[in-house]
Image (tube, rainbow, N blue to C red):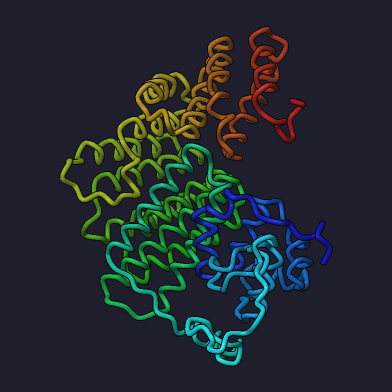
Amino acid sequence: MPDADRPQELPARLLTDPEMISACRVRDFARVFRLMKTRAGIYPSMVARRCELTPSRVGEVIAGRRQLLHMDVIERIADGLRIPGHMLGLARRPWETPQALVVTEREAPQQPDPEQQTPESLPSPDVDSILALTTRTSLSTATLEAFRASIEDYWKRDNQHGGEALRPAIVGQLRYVVGLLKESRAPAIQNGLYGVAAELARLTGWTYFDARQYNQARTYFTEALQLAKEIDDRQFMANVLACMSLQATYQDKPADSLALVTAAQDQARSSLGTTPRVLSMLSMREAFAHATLGARDSTHRAIGEAHRHFEQIRTSDPDPSWVTYFDEPKLLVDTGIAHGRLGEAATAEPLIADALRREDRSNQRGRAFHSFWLARTQLDQGKLDQACHTATEALESASTVSSERVTGHLREFYDQLAPSRQEPVALAFEARLRALLPPVSGSPHP
């Protein structure tokens, strides 16, 4: 194989990446190949050439339709991609030792090193594959807590930067946890694993939703529902259905949105432990569905229900971790957005503005999203200068986040500016837009 086709070494940042280390340890080559592409610029066709595999086989691995278990293939991957042997459970590879340090044995030792096995004593690839399938992973409550902590970190980073770059890591962990579910364990551990897998599936669906890749999002949301159903976690099923309801509003399917949030509320009410915060969040999602339908009275009623439930929240409530984001600023901003969807801009503007002053400033996507809503309500009232100033401030947050949803709201605001685009404030906004963000697809913005 020509040296030009084979990198002498991988970037240190990739070899020390916890996701890469985890993927190699469990020999999850779908994740390994994806990380090679995203972190080192080694594309599937290059992987195939360097590892002496067919491109179709590499594609099947990445798609999850094939596993690579034979030792000779694993060794070719280690050598072709320059993955140190210990990361894949192999002996040190010959290329890992610099040529200047290679020592030639003058005479074979009389007794073999007891720590080294001869090739004849190694299991065949088929036996190795069978043994790999029977390996049991030891888990404890501490392991579950580690999984949950990683999910919290994923959500934090998703809010700060968007989920596009995180998705391969999340999907890899999801598949790893789903694989663990195939082993029998104590009920408490097994149920905990189902909960972790359900949350990872929902998070994956959310990253696709945020990227406006709706079919993929629906697939993962459905998987999350199935996993939660296995342990009869009705509150979490309600949460997933609420996510699907919100997605339906973006797809301009308000009837679907209302049906999904109604099912979510039914699930929540059938669970004895459902907290007021969960019910408040669901009522607000119902308000979004009614507002998208243009049903003013029903929207106002659902908003009232959301606030009534919120007033019943107590600090001692056993809220699920996934709903703690729904605090008072979030209630206010969602109330404003619901009014904005109805065209009630004068009511919406002060609510959204107040929430923006109070909400967490590290949530860059949320701040961009809410700021563009504020700008739209100001523009709806004819406040061109104020709207452009708000939107210009929103660009600072939007420029730090990879989110097609945020881009979509930017596009909507930019389109709303069309009648006033030659005004000085609109031109200044467009200049800042050019400087901070790439072109907006489908708009005249270059």
x then y, percent, for residue 86: 54, 67
Residue at 45% over, 40% down:
288
Q: To which quarter of the image does residue 350 belong? A: top left
Q: Nearer the viewer, residue 117 or 99?
A: 99
Number of numbered markers: 0
x then y, percent, for residue 178: 45, 70
Query: Position of 401 compared to 332: left or right?
Result: right
x then y, percent, for residue 44: 73, 62
Q: Nearer the viewer, residue 259 or 351?
A: 351
Q: Residue furthest front?
A: 106
Residue 380 at least partly seen? no
Q: Nearer the viewer, residue 429 or 60?
A: 60
Query: Position of 221 compared to 33: left or right?
Result: left
Residue at 53% over, 63% down:
23
Query: Position of 115 compared to 309: left or right?
Result: right
x then y, percent, for residue 262: 39, 53
Residue at 48% over, 85% down:
114
Residue 9, relative to residue 103: is it above or below?
Answer: above
Q: To which quarter of the image does residue 120 belong? A: bottom right
Q: Residue furthest bottom?
A: 120
Query: Position of 254 compared to 410: left or right?
Result: left
The N terminus - image quarter: bottom right
The C terminus - image quarter: top right
Residue 384 at least partly seen? yes
Residue 340, relative to residue 97: is it above or below?
Answer: above
Residue 425, relative to residue 232: is it above or below?
Answer: above
Residue at 33% over, 60% down:
267
